[in-house]
Each structure stands twice: as structure tokens, then as C-alpha cells.
Amino acid sequence: MTRSHSKPFNVNVLGAGVSGLSTALALLEKGHYAVKVVSTHLPSDLNIDYTSPWAGAHWRSYADIADLVQQDLDTVTFKRFAYLAENEPNAGIMYITGHDYWEVKPKNFEDPWFKRLLKNYRYIPKEELPAGIEFGITYTTVAMNAPKYLMYLQEQFLTRGGILERATVPSLKALAQIPTRDNLKPDILVNCSGLGSRNLVGVHDMQMFPTRGQIVVVKVPDEIWPKAKQFTMERYAEGSAMGTGTITYVIPRDNGEIVLGGTMQHWNYQEAACEETTQAIMKRVLATRPDLFSKAIILRSCVGLRPNRRGGVRVSTSVEQLDWNEGWANQVALVAHNYGHAGFGYQASIGCANKVVADIESHLDELVEARSHARSMAKL
Ligand SMILES: Cc1cc2nc3c(=O)[nH]c(=O)nc-3n(C[C@H](O)[C@H](O)[C@H](O)COP(=O)(O)OP(=O)(O)OC[C@H]3O[C@@H](n4cnc5c(N)ncnc54)[C@H](O)[C@@H]3O)c2cc1C
């Protein structure tokens, strides 16, 4: 921010998922933004149109070895999560031992890029591999209790002076009409509406589509929990890749529940959990680690829709003229987008939020200039 911007900028953020709350918090931490979050759903709600509470979630980066940008976003996020795991029990994040199991060792296996970042990376010795697994790696990572982490973000946001408003907005223009925290018109709009970006007027992003994930939440007997809470895994069947129907994973939460997955079903909006899928997930997990899950009790089966996007995440910022009919000057705003995170919204959340804030900062002078130009045009 340059010295000429002495008053705080007023921001309306759309969406209270992990993307919206992380971005809102990152803005407040800068100290020169007054921030309001407007959202249909808020932390503690459970709804098929609100993805964030359904996630496992663990940090396991799928960034390509050459994708340095994504690696950077994931790295920043991992470091923040590691800090929270060590210092903030209320955040619901814990260190955990990750296991990736392959039924058939991939040809020309290359170590993932995160080998450099995570501690204790190693190949799993043959004698430690579960039955039916040919190859595996292990490393120390973090897992979060997603609903608890959302509550933590919300609390941090409110403590720093942010305001939450429950409302459904039909369009970006409607978001611009909502009075800001300080009862003004917003200078900046940030769209973190996830899958909602498909229907939001002014965005209508037709690249967005759901990837349905069914999960089973279980508990294990008390004597197994100390071991189970240290264990997260993904199991890859021969020829499987992300996005081809079924995946097998285990992610414990710090409240004693364990999330078992799952499915990756593109364009499937079905809200009800399918009993056959529940049984298939249990069977696959049991086959991999009977020592941990043979006495597991099913608490519930649930469904979340990952906000997937052809072409990948949209993180962008630009100065926009929102409406030519309602007076020029006040309708020029900075519009930022942060959505389309598919199955990786947590693990890149801090990196993406920081990127949005940096992009906004670099556009502030342009916003002020565009507004002043619009005001002089309005006088003509
Ligand atoms: C089963 C499952 C497992 C997953 N596991 C992992 C994992 O291990 N690691 C990981 O990183 N990620 C994981 N994910 C992905 C992760 O959950 C998502 O990427 C992330 O939650 C997306 O967050 P978001 O804030 O962008 O969207 P959402 O959480 O969907 O939030 C969107 C917000 O926008 C609001 N909104 C939308 N439209 C409007 C409107 N018109 N007006 C007002 N409000 C509106 C909604 O109410 C909501 O608050 C998983 C997802 C699923 C389903």
C-alpha cells in the first residue's frame, strides 16, 4: 500500500469456506482492510453446497514435480499448518505419519517434490507393507479436523474485527450493494464461493463442476486409537489416478473420529450416501489395515462436492466497472477470485489466500486511479 492510501479499504468477501475465511483473515492481518464475509453457509453448518466441513483433511501435495507455483502455495500452507499443530490446539491440526501405498509399483517411480519439505521421508521396507501392496512411501505430515479448523478461522477472523453476515447473493453486483463492515460501499470484492461460482451472475464460470466424494466416519476401540490417530494413508490400485472413480484413504481427526474414503465422481451431484459405496470403502480400508479397522464402528456416511475446475484453480484480481448505470465512481471496484480448489482446498489455502492479498495490494494504486478517472468523467 502506498502512503496515499491512508484510510482502510473496505472488502466484502463472498463465502465462508476454507478459501473465504483464510483470505478474509489474511486481509485483516495486513491491518489496512475492513473486512466483511457474506455467505449462505457458515462454520458449523452442514450442507451439500458447503464443501469445506466434509473434507478429511490431510496435507498431501499432488503438485507436479515441475509445477513450482503450486509447490510454493502448498509449501507456505504446510509451514503454517505445522506452526498451528505445534502452537494452537484449538486449530484442530496434528502431526501424523503419512503412508502412500501402491498395489503395483509405478514404472519409473520418481520421488514426489515434497520429499524436500517433509521430515522422515523414506520407502517403506517390504516387511512393513500391508498384504497386496508392492511399494510404499512414508513421511511426517499434518491432518486437520476440518469442522474444528473452520471454527478456529472464524474465531480468529471475528477476534481481529471481521464481521460475518449470513446472506445469499445472486450476483457480484449484489455483493457490491451490501454495506461493508463500516457501512460503506465496498472497494474490493473477493469471490470465494467455490462451486457457487458456476451460478453466480457476473462470474458464471462454466469450467466449474462437482467431483463427488463419499466418506465414512468411524470410531475404533480406545485401545486402538493411540495407534490409529498417528496413521493416515492413500492406497492406489493398479492403473488408478486421481479422478477415476475410487480412491482409498484414511484420515483421523483430533476428536477421535476417523474419516475413510472415498470416491472421485465427476459431475455427480447425488447428496445421499450410497450404502454399497460405504461397504466398498470399509472393505478396501479393512483389507489394507485390518489391525486398525477390524473393530471399527461406523458413525455415519456423508457426501461432499469438491469444487473442481477445468484448467485449475482461479486466483485472479482486476479493477472492474461493475455497473455503468448506477453512477460511475462508486461502481469501480477491485474484484478478486479464489475458487476451484477441487480436492486440495485445505492444503493450498494459506498460499492462495496470501497470493490473493498480494495481488490486491499490487492493484490498489490502479483502483484509486480508476476511481479518480471515473469521478472526473462523471462530472463531464
Ligand atoms: C470428501 C472430501 C475430502 C477432501 N479431502 C481434502 C483433503 O484431504 N485435503 C484438502 O486440501 N482438501 C480436501 N478436500 C477439498 C476441500 O474440502 C475443498 O477444496 C475446499 O473445502 C473448498 O473450499 P471453498 O472455501 O473454496 O468452498 P466451500 O467450502 O464450498 O465454500 C463456499 C462458500 O461460498 C458460499 N456461497 C456460494 N455461493 C454463494 C452465494 N451465491 N451467496 C452466498 N454465499 C455463497 C457457501 O455458502 C460457502 O460458504 C476434500 C473434499 C471432499 C468433499
Image: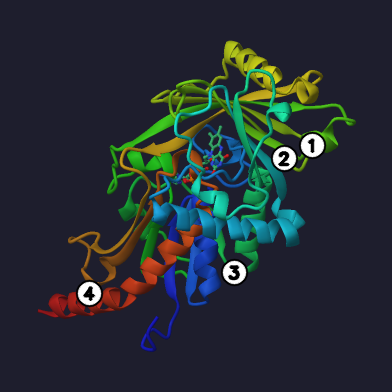
Asked if 330 appears above or below 68 in the picture, the reply is below
The residue that label 1 is drawn on is 256
Q: Name the amino acid, label 3.
A: Gly
* C-alpha span from label 2 to label 1: 6 Å
Secondary structure state at the residue bearing disc 4: helix
The answer to whether the residues at label 2 and label 1 have Cβ atoms under 8 Å apart is: yes
Query: Residue lying farthest bottom?
Result: 3
- Residue 258 seen in this snapshot: yes
- Of the residues under marks 1 and 4, which one precedes in the sequence? 1
Residue located beneath label 3 in the image: 161
Q: Are marks 3 and 1 in contact (CB under 8 Å)?
A: no
> Label 4, label 3: how many angstroms apart (C-alpha)?
28 Å
Which of the two labelled residues, at mark 3 and mark 2, occupies the earlier sequence position? 3
Looking at the image, is mark 3 or mark 1 earlier in the sequence?
3
Is residue 185 in view from this perspective? no
Q: Amino acid at mark 2?
A: Arg
Classify residue 260 by image quadrant.
top right
Is 150 located above or below residue 317 in the figure? above
Name the spot of residue 377 as percent of width and height, x first. Answer: 13, 76
Determine whether the residue tagged by mark 1 lies in a helix, strand or loop.
loop
The tag earlier along the polypeptide, 4 or 3, is 3
CA gap, disc 4 and disc 2: 48 Å
Q: Which circle's residue, 4 or 2, is located before the other in the chain? A: 2
Q: CA distance from mark 1 to mark 4?
A: 53 Å
Query: Which amino acid, mark 1?
Result: Gly
Q: Nearer the viewer, residue 123 or 161?
A: 123
Q: Which numbered dot is residue 370?
A: 4
Give residue 95's position: percent from left, percent from top: 71, 49
Q: Which residue is mark 2?
A: 253
Q: Amino acid at mark 4?
A: Ala
Mark 3, ligand 1, within 8 Å: the answer is no
Name the image quarter holding residue 222. top right
